[in-house]
Amino acid sequence: MILDLARQGLSVSAIARRTGFDRKTVRRHIERGLEPPVYTPRPPRLSL
């Protein structure tokens, strides 16, 4: 939805108002595009 609004030419602030997300969140999704997030496994924690 964010990408569709960006393609229509809406500003980041306008998209944030329409969707309810923060401007930084909107900007991050626009920059990332359609690629899924990449998660890495956490390193194991040392036990006592």
Image: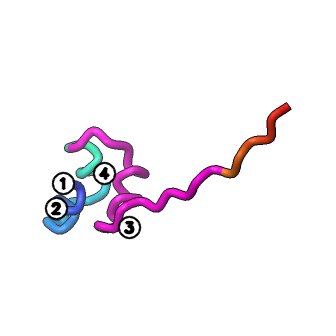
Give the residue furthest to the right.
48
Label drawn at residue 31:
3
Q: Is the C-beta separation of discs 2 and 3 under 8 Å?
A: no
Badge 2 amino acid: Asp
**Element on which disc 1 rests:** loop
Q: Quickly name the residue at label 4.
A: 13
Sequence order check: which comes first, mark 2 or mark 3?
2
Badge 3 amino acid: Glu
Q: Please name which of the two marks, 4 or 3, marks the residue nearer to the observer.
A: 3
Mark 4 and mark 3: span between their CA atoms?
15 Å
Where does the image place residue 35, in percent across and percent down from the top left? 34, 67
Q: Nearer the viewer, residue 25 or 10?
A: 25
Vertical relation: 35 (above or below) 29: below
Q: Quadrant of the N terminus?
A: bottom left
Where does the image place residue 45, in percent across and percent down from the top left? 74, 42
**Element on which disc 2 rests:** helix
**Element on which disc 3 rests:** helix
Q: For mark 3, does the 10 Å Cα neighbourhood hold few (<14), some (14 to 19), or many (20 or more) residues?
A: few
Label drawn at residue 1:
1
Left or right: 37, with 40 as reference point: left
Vertical relation: 42 (above or below) 33: above
Look at the image and give the residue range highlighted in magenta: 19-42
Q: Quickly name the residue at label 2.
A: 4
Q: Is 48 one of the magenta-colored residues?
A: no
Badge 4 amino acid: Ser
Mark 3 and mark 1: span between their CA atoms?
14 Å
Q: Nearer the viewer, residue 20 or 48?
A: 48
Q: Is the C-beta separation of discs 2 and 1 under 8 Å?
A: yes
